[in-house]
Image (spheres, rainbow, N blue to C red):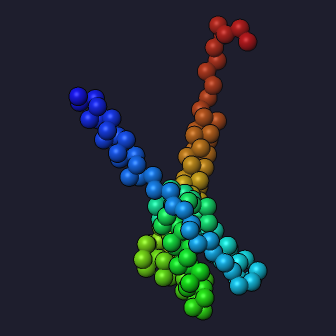
Amino acid sequence: MTAALLLALALGSGEAKAQVGTDVAPLEFRDAREEARFHALVSELRCVMCQNQSLADSNAQIAFDLRHEVLDLMREGRTDAQIKDFLVARYGEFVLYRPRVETRTWLLWLGPGLLLLGGGFVVARIVRRRSSSPVADDASQEW
């Protein structure tokens, strides 16, 4: 009885998470320039539901809705920066694949370099310490 209940809960929660959307009205572009701009823009935006998928690659229903929203904003005459600002205001910095360089994100941008420099400093100290210590002369060693 308990196992059946757990199985039902597990299956039920799986259905709730897997909401793959279907685009009932595929996007129609006015010209090739608009289509190229749209694809460039949605490839720089992250799906707010999926992990590490761009808005262009995601099949989630919210991604379909956001692609329509982006196209509507483009047709309103907004610039790419204004569209990104609009989405950041709604969903936060997470929606940007390349977060802006700000005081809040400086560690994100500079962190890997600082970590690499710190690691290089530690390795240099270890190598220097080992090279300065005398090697014990062991006569019993055959090589």
The residue lying furthest to the bottom in this view is: 77
Q: Residue at x 60, y 49 (%)?
A: 120
- Say which of 115 and 62 sits in front: 62
Residue 106 visible in the displayed image: no
For residue 29, side relative to residue 14 (left or right): right
Q: Position of residue 83 (x, y in %)?
A: 54, 82
Quick check: 21 above or below 11? below
**In-image side of 34 versus 105 (left or right):** right
The structure residue drawn at horizontal position 62% and vertical position 41%, both measured from the top left corner, is 128
Quarter in which the N terminus is drawn: top left
| 73 to the left or right of 89 | right
Residue 72 on image: x %, y %: 56, 84
Say if 21 sits above or below 10 in the image.
below
Nearer to us in this view, 6 or 26: 26
**Quadrant of the image occupied by residue 3:** top left
Tally the numbered discs: 0
Image location of residue 29, percent across then percent down: 69, 80
Q: Which residue occupies 37% across, 41% down?
A: 11
From the top left corner, tell me how far across and down residue 79 is, in percent. 60, 88
Q: Nearer the viewer, residue 135 or 28?
A: 28
Residue drawn at point x = 48 percent, y = 67 percent: 62
Q: Quadrant of residue 142?
A: top right
